[in-house]
Amino acid sequence: MIRLILALLLPWLVFFTIGRPVQGILCLILQATLIGWIPAAIWAVWALNNYNTDQKIANAGLGD
């Protein structure tokens, strides 16, 4: 829940919390413009959703 709020307010920081620093830097560059904030937030929420799904699969023992 906290990461979702963070994805909307500071999208670039979410990438660092899920272990994707290169994408975090790219997101920060995108977010540097006011117009880029919305795509950055959408990208962060999408990446967070994928991360959560990957974690659930790994916890179920179905991942690699």
Image (cartoon, rainbow, N blue to C red):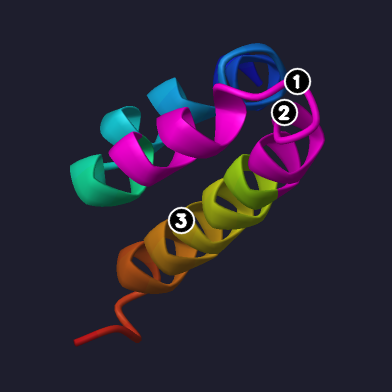
Q: Does residue 55 belong to the magenta stretch? A: no
Packing grade of label 2 (10 A; few <14, some 14-19, many >=20) is: many
Residue in front for this viewpoint, 60 or 37: 37
Question: Would residue 40 appear left or right of 32 to someone viewing this image?
Answer: right
Whether pointer 2 and pointer 1 mark residues with C-beta atoms closer than 8 Å, the reply is yes
Q: Marks 3/1: CA distance?
A: 26 Å
What is the tally of numbered marks visible in this picture?
3
**Where is the C terminus found, in terms of image quarters?**
bottom left
Mark 2 to mark 1 CA distance (whole Å): 5 Å
Type of amino acid under label 2: Trp
Instruction: Name the kind of residue labelled 3 in the image.
Output: Tyr
Disc 1 crowd, CA 10 A, few/some/many (<14, 14-19, 20+): few
Q: Earlier in the sequence, mark 3 or mark 2?
A: 2
Residue under the image location 46 percent in, 56 percent down: 51
Please check the rendered image and state whether residue 27 is part of the magenta-colored stretch, yes or no. yes
3 vs 1, front mark: 1
Q: Which residue is mark 3?
A: 51
Q: Which residue is mark 2?
A: 37
| Distance between mark 3 and mark 2 Cα atoms | 21 Å
Judging from the image, what secondary structure is the residue with disc 1 in? loop
Point 38% across, 44% down: residue: 26
First to last magenta residue range = 25-42
What residue did someone put label 1 on? 34
Q: Quadrant of residue 40?
A: top right
Q: Residue at x 43, y 67 (%)?
A: 54
